[in-house]
Amino acid sequence: MKILFMPECYFDTVLIKKLVKNNDLVWHQKGCNKVVSKCLNLKNTFNVGIIDKDKKDLKGLLSFECYSKEGLNIYLKQGSNVIFIQLNPPIEKWIINICEDEKIDLNKFPLPSEVKKLKILQNLR
């Protein structure tokens, strides 16, 4: 069975493309609701949705069990062809937190070290 990865934002997409190394398996979607909808409706593939933890809970995840550890929420459902990986906090803050923990200066790359500015940069892509 073919595996498809569906990230919901630019940073998620770049990360998954680097990890998977096969762009045909990465289907960028715009927004968490679209990722959840696409993943739940595609039947002949194994779907991995990559989403951020946003302010609103996603209704499509209510029937899934959530397992949380170190900034990741993994949503699984017995017998389902779908897994959701949710970054918590959203990827911009997640990246900044990791860089702070590891003493990495984002300004050297050059990337902003503020969530709001990192989000703006992402939206320019």
Image (cartoon, rainbow, N blue to C red):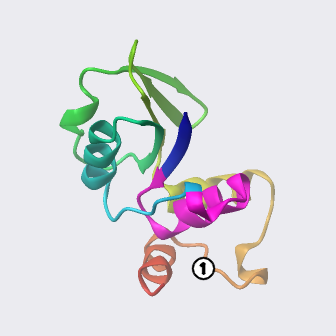
Tell me which amino acid carries mark 1: Pro
Residue of label 1: 112
Q: Residue furthest left?
A: 59
Q: Nearer the viewer, residue 44 or 11?
A: 44
Residue 78 part of the magenta segment: no
Q: Residue at x 53, y 72 (%)?
A: 114
Secondary element at tag 1: loop
Q: Relative to 125, is 79 on the left or the right? A: left
In magenta, the rendered stretch is: 6-24
| Up-down relation of residue 81 to residue 50 (above or below) | above
Q: Residue at x 24, y 39 (%)?
A: 57
Q: Nearer the viewer, residue 84 or 70?
A: 84
Instruction: Please state the horizontal and vertical placement of residue 37, each as a whole percent of the image.
Output: 25, 45
Q: How many marks?
A: 1
Q: Relative to 62, is 96 on the left or the right? A: right
Instruction: Please state the horizontal and vertical placement of residue 72, each as a whole percent of the image.
Output: 54, 36
Instruction: Please state the horizontal and vertical placement of residue 27, each as a whole percent of the image.
Output: 46, 60
